Amino acid sequence: MKDAKSCTSISELRDEIDRIDRMIMELLARRQEFVCEIVRFKTDEKSIVAKSRQEQLYKQRRAWAEELHLSPDMIDEVYKTIVHHNIKKELELHNKSKKQ
């Protein structure tokens, strides 16, 4: 991966952004694998929603954002979206396993 300052054209910068976006998506796919497996250890909808875990996660991600000079508000939005979709997936898997 190149250093952003070493890029000499807009197209080179866009190519690097595309590569990074692909890497982010691959990491999100890997994260989802773990989300799908965690359902095995959750017994009900309350444990899937896990409000206290959510609050801990958002607080930690905001702190990481600050350390990395990112907007904590942006990271908060991103993770709230990720968690919302993960909970939806976990509930789907949980309900499917109950029917079997």
Image (spheres, grey):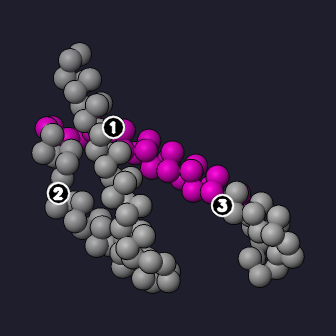
Give the image quarter of residue 71: bottom left
Question: Residue 72: x and y, percent?
Answer: 39, 76
Q: What residue is drawn where x is 30% and y is 30%?
A: 93
Residue type beneath disc 1: Lys
Which circle's residue, 2 or 1, is located before the other in the chain? Answer: 2
In terms of secondary structure, where does tag 2 sit? helix
Give the image quarter of residue 5: bottom right
Residue corresponding to mark 1: 89
User: Which stretch appears magenta?
Assistant: 19-44
Residue corresponding to mark 3: 20
Which circle's residue, 3 or 1, is located before the other in the chain? Answer: 3
Residue situated furthest top in the rendering: 100
Q: Nearer the viewer, residue 58 or 76?
A: 76
Q: What residue is drawn where x is 77% and y is 60%?
A: 15
Q: Left or right? Give the position of 83 relative to 100.
A: right
Q: Nearer the viewer, residue 100 or 71?
A: 71
Q: How many marks?
A: 3
- Work out how far the residue at label 3 is from the one at label 1, CA to CA, in angstroms: 25 Å
Q: Are marks 2 and 1 in contact (CB under 8 Å)?
A: no
Badge 2: how crowded within 10 Å, few (<14), some, or many (20+)?
few
Q: Left or right? Give the position of 7 relative to 76.
A: right
Magenta portion: prevailing SS class: helix
In terms of secondary structure, where does tag 3 sit? helix
Above or below, 82 against 33 in this view is: below
- Work out how far the residue at label 2 is from the one at label 1, CA to CA, in angstroms: 16 Å
Residue type beneath disc 3: Ile
